[in-house]
Image (spheres, grey):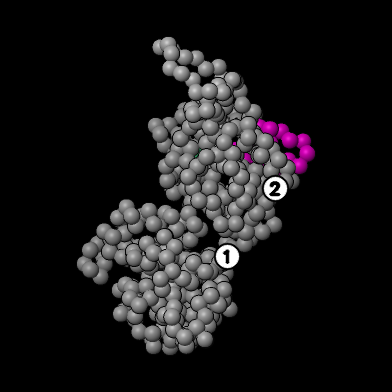
């Protein structure tokens, strides 16, 4: 694990009883020769004094956005640029909510908005506050924006409750921060094209055939690659998701459009991942006007769409390392291995979508197959799964001649 020697770290402290543990975190960082600047919210100063934090960090503590003296020493934008990483420990429910909506109403929230550095968040709050849907939604939104999390842990809380909400221990936070640096930017040499989401096949000007793909899995893969410095192009069907920072997004509607964009991208990228749920068939003749209700039955003639990933897999020039997905409801392993061969893929990620699993859900599990082996990635949220999948793809990519 990389040590944090000479790394420039902003430690943000918000109001919570766990703030006392941040003193130990700062001590650990300083012991390992990191440069530390501390930013506190007003509420944090009710729990730890700026004087203590100054003594431990070796630098003046920044408290206010509107402090002329502090701005003279190092302005908030300068501080945002100075940071190589920002760690917020403890992060209160209130601070997470403000961060989620992009507020900049104090120094710490402004800094988070202004920095390009990775942000590690160590939440700490009462277990019931942590379990609330709104808090969980905030965490999911921040995670989708690329922020990293450590904890919270489970156990007895200062208020006497028992549950999940205790801030991670300083050593755990320190290790998570080191990992963040370890993982950073090690794939800058790599370009990756990913398809995501559903396609829509028009029936008439107001109706279409589609499926329940939300795009979450594909977007999570894009984020996992871009966080490690890869150049990422995301070709996506219609989804309601925010593009991860620094990802090039190409919006498409139909399978034919996706096919055209994907084939162009495939030859320009080293890795191609087909995570989209592409419609296998489209309507043979799209009605120019809205189809009027008439008899009791109506028939639609469907014709086959091009198979995007098979066309990429069969490229004879500039073929990328090609990874497909298989969404199956039965005979998962057999069907996935069949697709691996038939579509000429380097790897296939099989998921069991029976009973409404996976499509649109937060979690997934995958069974990966390649010509020489297979590996299971157990059930977890799609962001974590994507990170594990990136590791597996990189291992196989590197061992392919
Ligand atoms: O988007 P989410 O809600 O997060 O859900 C994720 C997911 C279930 C969509 C994803 O994990 C997944 O399994 N994607 C592939 C869905 C699919 O269409 O599977 P398939 O077994 O029908 O297709 C096999 C492969 O061929 C896939 O890589 C698919 O992208 C590709 N394909 C299929 C048809 C076609 N005409 N062109 C293709 O490229």
Q: Residue at x 76, y 42 (%)?
A: 318
Where's ligand 1: which quadrant? top right
The region drawn magenta spans 309-325
Q: Residue at x 47, y 61 (%)?
A: 148
Q: CA distance from mark 1 to mark 2?
A: 23 Å
User: Residue 240, image x and y in percent?
Assistant: 47, 45
- The residue furthest front is 289
Residue 127 or residue 302, whichever sits in front: 302
170, above or below 383, in the image = below
User: Residue 332, image x and y in percent?
Assistant: 50, 31
Q: Secondary structure at mark 2?
A: loop
248, above or below 35, in the image = above
Give the labeled residue for mark 1: 182
User: Residue 122, image x and y in percent?
Assistant: 40, 66
Residue 218 visible in rendering: yes
The numbered disc on residue 270 is 2
| Residue 121 location, quadrant | bottom left
> Which comes before the other along the chain, label 1 or label 2?
1
């Amino acid at each position: 694990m990389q040590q944090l020697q000479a790394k420039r770290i902003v430690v943000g402290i918000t109001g919570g009883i766990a703030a006392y543990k941040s003193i130990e975190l700062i001590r650990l960082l300083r012991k390992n020769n990191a440069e530390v600047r501390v930013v506190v919210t007003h509420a944090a100063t009710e729990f730890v004094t700026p004087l203590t934090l100054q003594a431990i960090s070796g630098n003046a503590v920044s408290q206010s956005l509107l402090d002329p003296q502090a701005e003279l020493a190092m302005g908030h934008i300068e501080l945002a640029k100075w940071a190589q990483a920002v760690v917020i420990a403890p992060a209160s429910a209130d601070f997470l909510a403000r961060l989620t909506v992009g507020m900049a109403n104090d120094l710490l929230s402004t800094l988070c908005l202004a920095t390009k550095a990775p942000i590690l968040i160590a939440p700490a709050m009462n277990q019931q506050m942590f379990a609330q849907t709104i808090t969980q939604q905030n965490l999911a939104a921040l995670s989708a924006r690329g922020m990293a999390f450590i904890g919270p842990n489970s156990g007895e809380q200062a208020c006497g409750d028992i549950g999940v909400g205790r801030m991670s221990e300083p050593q755990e936070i320190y290790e998570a921060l080191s990992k963040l640096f370890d993982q950073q930017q090690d794939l800058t040499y790599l370009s990756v094209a990913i398809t995501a989401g559903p396609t829509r096949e028009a029936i008439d000007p107001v109706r279409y055939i589609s499926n329940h793909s939300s795009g979450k899995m594909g977007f999570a893969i894009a984020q996992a690659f871009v966080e490690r410095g890869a150049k990422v192009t995301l070709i996506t069907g219609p989804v309601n998701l925010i593009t991860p920072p620094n990802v090039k997004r190409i919006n498409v509607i139909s399978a034919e459009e996706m096919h055209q964009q994907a084939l162009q991208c495939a030859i320009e990228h080293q890795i191609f991942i087909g995570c989209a749920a592409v419609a296998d068939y489209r309507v043979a003749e799209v009605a120019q006007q809205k189809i009027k209700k008439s008899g009791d039955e109506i028939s639609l003639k469907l014709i086959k769409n091009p198979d995007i990933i098979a066309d990429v897999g069969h490229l004879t020039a500039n073929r990328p390392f090609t990874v497909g997905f298989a969404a199956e409801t039965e005979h998962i392993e057999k069907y996935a291995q069949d697709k691996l061969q038939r579509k000429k893929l380097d790897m296939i990620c099989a998921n069991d979508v029976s009973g409404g699993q996976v499509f649109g859900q937060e979690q997934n599990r995958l069974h990966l197959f390649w010509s020489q082996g297979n590996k299971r990635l157990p059930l977890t949220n799609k962001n974590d799964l994507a990170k594990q999948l990136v590791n597996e793809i990189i291992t196989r990519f590197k061992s392919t001649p």
